[in-house]
Amino acid sequence: MFSQWNSIFLQAPQIIPSKRKMVRNVVAKAYVEDSEEIEGLIFHYTDSLGSVIAQEDIYFNVPQGRLKLRISSPNPNGQLIYYQRPNIAGPKVSDSRLTEVEDVLCLKKTLSLALGELGVVQKRRRVYVKDNVHIHLDEVKGIGCFIEFSVALDDMDTDEKGIEQAMRVMEVLQIEKSSLVSVAYLDLLMQNHETDKHII
């Protein structure tokens, strides 16, 4: 057993210097019924076709907030992300800390042993950027298609200013309030899993 733990510590993941940062955003997420329509609206808003990445988010057990390790392809590095945000539908403030890591698989093994895995979310994400707005069009394995966007806030911005901008983005992209999602993808996956168990 000691040799197992020794190997973990000897292979400690490399934290990339100057890649730790606090991030404050206003975020929103919604179900997508017509992906072609929303893609057209996003293109007209951003004047971009976006870039596609495959992501796997491994969530770990923590006493508060959310801790996830993101593995993206083709990016060889990973991101350790801790965030706190309320489970409410509509634009909401999200405070997060993001750390870039090089040996993402080693870190996954360490965190899994130390904290235990809560669940895994796999998705195909198309990323668009316009000024301080990041838009994600996600195909999430097991639950479907979603749009998620964030408005980045700087130190001088108020929460109210970010929420107002997010509401304008919702209007441009024709996102209805009835389609907004209050919880994380992981919560939706776990809800589906519970429903499937009851059906069986």
Image: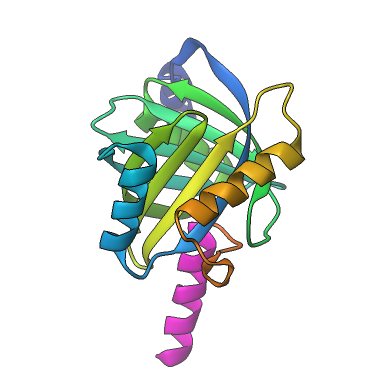
State the residue at coordinates (28%, 28%).
Answer: 75
Q: Main secondary structure of the magenta part?
A: helix
Where is residue 53 shown, x and y percent of the image? 27, 39
Where is residue 139 shown, x and y percent of the image? 32, 57
State the residue at coordinates (67%, 49%).
Answer: 92
Where is residue 157 shown, x and y percent of the image? 72, 28
Indicate whether 97 appears above or below 44: above
Indicate whether 174 appears above or below 161: below
Question: Is residue 194 magenta-colored?
Answer: yes
Report the span colored magenta. Answer: 185-200
Where is residue 149 shown, x and y percent of the image? 49, 46
Labels in figure, total: 0
Question: Is residue 114 magenta-colored?
Answer: no
Q: Please identify the residue farthest to the top as the structure is shown.
A: 17
Visible in this render: residue 27? Answer: no
Indicate whether 179 appears above or below 155: below
Quarter of the image where one finds residue 102: top left
Judged left or right of residue 186, residue 136 is left
Visible in this render: residue 107? Answer: yes
Judged left or right of residue 179, residue 92 is right
